[in-house]
Amino acid sequence: MIRSSLLALSLISLPASAFAAQDCASLKKLAVPDATILSATEVPSQPFAAPISTPGLMLPPLCVVKGILHPTTDSKIRFEVWLPQTGWNGKIVDVGNGGFAGSIGYQQMGANVLAGYASGDSDAGHQADSEDASWAFGHPEKIKDFAWRAVHLTAGVTKTMVKAYYGKPQEKAYFDSCSDGGREALMEAQRFPQDYDGILAGAPANNWTHMLTNGLAMAQAMGDDPTAFFSSMKLPAIHAASLAACDAQDGVKDGILSDPEHCRFDPAVLTCKGAEDTSCLTPKQVQTLRALYTGSKDAKGQTIFPGYVPGDEGAGWKSWILGTAPTTGSGGAYVTNYFRYMVYNDPKWNPLAANTEDALRRGMEGAAKEVDATNADLSAFAAHGGKLILYHGWNDPGISPWNTVNYFNAVKKTMGEAKAGQTVRLFMAPGVEHCLGGPGPSLFGQLGFPAANGKGSGAMDLLQVWAEKGTAPEMILATTPKDPRVPQIVRPLCAYPKRAVYNGKGDPNQPDSFTCKAD
């Protein structure tokens, strides 16, 4: 679910060499519960396939351990652990998955070992494209592997390999992922609070069942009545109208909506006054757009899941929400696969013939117990000393950013604001889409990408400072990728509920021109 970003990772210098307690090959003989170690191989330094080619960027020499976890007779969780042969910094950063998983995150693992970490990941128990959940049909144990078991067991395997190879346990263990990986991150904090000392969770799909029930309602709104569907050709007009309504509210008219909580964009301004064309919406289409912004409601009038935020209705909306025709967007694929193969266990289940209330009920009675990660009580994670940084792009077209705000507020209400403040921080990123990308600065040291202000200033760096030294982050700098065609933007992301407010003077592309303020 994470879209590629056009940037190159910088090679980070590694600390002094560490001496392995065992040679790599001997790790194949380790007895690991519910696991088969397939290979343990020394891999020489080799070119790293960054998002775009970077001449001279090389992975360090590694000990690569591959294996299969089989906690049940129907489980086959493929995993890998990468161990730097020299220069290990004493820490672990494990990786999560996107969508319905199905593959190992080699790119992020490569970034982690470049920075000196040991790193592990799994395919979550199956091999498939990220929008495909057909593997779950008739396999309840595989659903558990995907939902929570694979990440937990991989955490244990990574620690086992680290201790055996280096002759000592890790100093700290961290987890860094987004989207479904953000859901996995919260699942770890909630179910297995001692697995990690610090967790960086982006755009979490943690409220999975409600999220996809809302997607079902939106699919029906646009699919049941084709006249209520609007083509992606109308997105430029919608985008222009939403920016006209709210862009300047933060003091800078720059194409980035930085204050969505105070945006009052009424889609009715786009109602066609004459013949319909791509510059306007019919009344039914206005109603559909309004529903996308507000989210769906159940029979009692309660919101099932919140809606999207105005300000970046472009390519992301086309691929995620609209597609090329009714029910063809990525969101529709996730809806169909979840309810067809995880909830109803019926390959013929049809979203346009489904009852939304029944889908939510069946989901909550079944798969949600495994997949959803909505427990707001992080007391056990706090008792472990764990630190959690949440982040979400305000213009995410895949998962409503309000969901993460709601979860953060629920944690504060459940634990008390003071205790929650010692454990969790939330950073909302204006103009940022799903995990990465968008008109706003979306690179801030997450997912293995560089920090805006160099080594030590990114989200993962600040998470470690918090976990190891007790200093909680109040601001993270974010940047856009370097591009000679456009000015680079560097801005602060403020600890929620604060937001970056323009000072009224100075270069709006520089962070010193902004101050973190609360309403």
Image: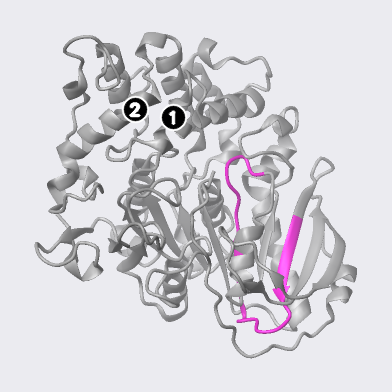
Pointer 2: what residue?
Answer: 292
Measured Cα–Cα span from mark 1 to mark 2: 9 Å
Rendered position, 397 above or below 356: below
Q: Is residue 308 left or right of residue 179?
A: left
Magenta-colored span = 79-101
- Reply yes or no: does residue 51 show up in magenta: no
* Disc sitting over residue 321 in the figure: 1
Q: Residue at x 66, y 26 (%)?
A: 341
- Reply yes or no: does residue 85 show up in magenta: yes
Q: Residue at x 24, y 63 (%)?
A: 509
Residue 263 appears anywhere in the view? no
Q: Residue at x 53, y 67 (%)?
A: 9
How far from the left and from the top, in percent, is residue 232?
39, 26
For the N terminus, the image quarter is top right
Circle 2: residue type: Leu
How far from the left and from the top, in percent, is residue 495?
29, 61
How far from the left and from the top, in percent, is residue 104?
68, 53
CB atoms of marks 1 and 2 within 8 Å = yes
Q: Secondary structure at mark 2?
A: helix
Q: Secondary structure at mark 1?
A: helix
